[in-house]
Amino acid sequence: MDLKKEKLVRFYSNEKEQKNLLWRRSDPHQLEKSSSGYNVLSSRPKTDGGFVRGSGISETLKFGRSKVFPEEDKPWRKRILDPGSEIVLQWNRVFMVSCLLALFVDPLYFYLPSIGGNKETRCVKTELNLRIVVTCLRTIADFFYLLHMIIKFRTAYVAPSSRVFGRGELVMDPKKIARRYIRSDFFIDLIATLPLPQIVIWFIIPETSPQADHDNNALALIVLLQYVPRLYLIFPLSSQIIKANGVVTKTAWAGAAYNLLLYMLASHVLGASWYLLSVDQYTSCWKSVCKNESAPTKCLLHYLDCDTFSHDNRMSWAKTTMVFNMCDPTTFNYGIFENAVTKNVVSSSFIEKYFYCLWWGLQNLSF
């Protein structure tokens, strides 16, 4: 039976068996060594005595350092990456770090709402400088996710139907690679890559309602909606690194730092969520009292927005309103969020409230 002109890979358990293939008898389909140490089956003309001289193999090995398959007629941007090459493994490590940093950036959106004003009259506002910084950091993280998607479209894979003990067919057809990727992880990666929080905080929320008139539910929902797939991507990525190296980190100290980082990440998410819910609980009390207040001046919800703090009607209302007295911690029970109100965490600077919330998350996780 004639063999199809395809490229196959053969897996070996150690490097010694791979190095013994410097000379091999030539068939109509001759084994070549790929950049990751696999053996790719391809056609090569015969030479003296039916053998391929060492120089031909050396050229293949030399090209293997470039970590792509030898397709001389194609530009570099159209070449297919070897899934076991060093450049792919190095990118997985870089993308792993970028994923962890992205998971730290996303909860920073929860710190955008803040309580402003003075002791007599309060209002709710959005930290503009923090919004700009978080948007820039989030955009950089989105670029890494987009680049990871592009690399997946150009990375070969071993066909599952051809996997037998010791060998398998390496698929390098871009159409087959794209079809397989779209059917597997494409939509998860796409959801994780979309700049949804940026769109919500810069376009949707400012156009829909005043800051004091919404419960930050839209922002929290969008961030959490993308946080789940972004967190999920770490697990298959860790599996790929473990399959290639045996461990995620090469040293014990790096492994300890990695586990500590995951623990700090959990505390960071918990503390940021507690802060956002504290602000929401505080403003919810304002709105519930405001809706029932009609004398001597009718309370309007946009009076609770810091954008109207210097308006004449708002200033006259602030002198007679009982909203802030009714929502004082001595008269209203805030429960788990009491410390955020009594210790002015909701109205502190970003550095102070961030480290306090991080400490709160660490303290509660330790219990």
Image (tube, helix red, strand yellow):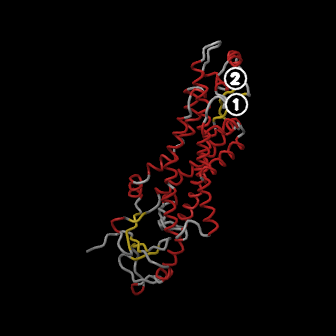
Tell which of 19 and 22 is nearer to you. 19
Occupied quadrant, residue 170: bottom left
Secondary element under disc 2, as helix, strand or loop, is: loop
Residue 364 vs 328, above or below: the answer is: below
| Residue appearing at x 57%, y 24% in the figure | 288
What's the residue at 60%, 37% (across, down)? 335
| Residue 138, horizontal then vertical, whole percent | 60, 45
In the rendered image, the vertical position of residue 28 relative to residue 87, given as above or below? below
Residue toward you, 37 or 210? 210
- Quickly name the residue at label 2: 309
Under mark 2, the amino acid is Phe
Instruction: From the viewer's perspective, tell me whether residue 68 is left or right of residue 8.
Output: right
Q: Which residue is mark 1?
A: 116
Residue 309 in picture, x, y percent from top left:
70, 23
Do tag 2 and tag 1 residues touch (Cβ < 8 Å)?
yes
Q: Is residue 238 left or right of residue 346?
A: left
Query: Which quadrant of the view contains residue 212?
Result: top right
Q: Residue type at mark 1: give it.
A: Gly
